[in-house]
Each structure stands twice: as structure tokens, then as C-alpha cells.
Amino acid sequence: MLEISDLPTVNATLNTISGILLTIGYVFIRQRKIAAHKKCMLAAFGVSVLFLLSYVIYHYHAGSKPFTKQGWMRPVYFTILISHILLAFVIVPLALRTLYLAWRERFDAHRRIAKITFPIWLYVSVTGVLIYLMLYQM
């Protein structure tokens, strides 16, 4: 059974899976494998929703963990954290809009916004894992 203390690792795993699915989905669309792209992107969205639920549950019960390390890593950590938080807020409406446009088969508009959504979503996924590693593994 999972404990609250296990959720940061679960969250990092979900972020990793999301990043992998996003990357594979990108490769699929570049190869014009539309059905595979759609499955990957929907799976990435589902995994991201699971991440968000797990993240909220963890922080509701455990609060936040302070970053205690000093030296060069401290400004690096906070730079990554601040950019991650800001872009995490931005990605929610962007991802929803991107998925909505695909669902409505408005593919020209979908492509335009996906060019913005994809790199931000991938950045948020990757930096989420980096933040976990800096907080819990270093």
C-alpha cells in the first residue's frame, strides 16, 4: 500500500512517463502516424491528470519540502523551480485547448497551438523530475 511519503516518487515516475509519451507522440506525428500520435497524446494527458491528483494529495497532507542545500545548486534549483511553476500554470489551459482543437478536428489551429504546447509541456514534465531529484535524491 502506498504511503503519503511515496507520492513524490510516484509523481516523478508519472512525469517521466508523461515526458516519454509526449516525445513518442511527437515522433509519431512527424512520421504521419496519426492514430498512434493521438493515443500517445491522450495517454500523456491522462498520466498528467494522475500526476496532478497525486501532487495535490501529497501537498495537502505533507505540505512542501524545503530545499536545504547551499552553494551553486541553490540558485539552479530555484531557477528551475520558478520556471517550472509558472509554466505548469500555463500548460493546463494550453493542453486543454490543444486537445479540444484536435477533438473538434480543427487541425490547422491544433498544429499552430501544439507547436507552443508541446515544448512547454515537455519542459514541465522534465523539470518536474529534476526538481524531484534535487529535493529527494541529492
Image: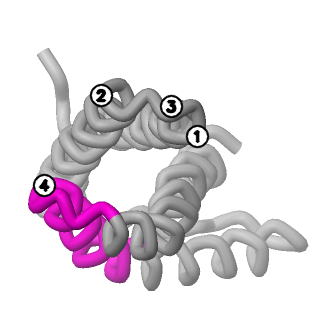
Q: Against 31, is 101 above or below? A: below
* Inter-mark Cα distance, 1 to 2: 12 Å
Q: Residues within 10 Å of mark 2 (few under 14, many from 20)?
A: few
| Mark-to-mark CA distance, 3 and 2 | 9 Å
Check disc 3: other Cα within 10 Å, few if <14, some if 14-19, many if 20+.
some
1 lies above or below 122: above
Q: Amino acid at mark 3?
A: Phe
Nearest to the observer: residue 2 or residue 21? 21
The image quadrant where one finds the C terminus is: top right
Q: Few, some or many C-alpha atoms within 10 Å of disc 1 (few <14, some 14-19, many ≥20)?
A: few
Q: Which residues are magenta?
A: 88-107
**Residue type of the residue flagged with mark 2:** Ala
- State the image quarter where residue 105 is shown: bottom left
Disc 1 or 4, which lies upstream in sequence?
A: 1
Element class at badge 4: helix
Which residue is labeled 4 in the image? 103
C-alpha span from label 4 to label 2: 13 Å
Whether residue 31 can be seen here: yes
Q: CA distance from mark 1 to mark 4?
A: 19 Å
Residue occupied by mark 2: 35
Secondary structure beneath label 1: helix
Drawn side of residue 65 relative to residue 132, left or right: left
Total numbered circles = 4
Residue assigned mark 3: 28
Mark 4 or mark 2: whose residue is earlier in sequence:
2
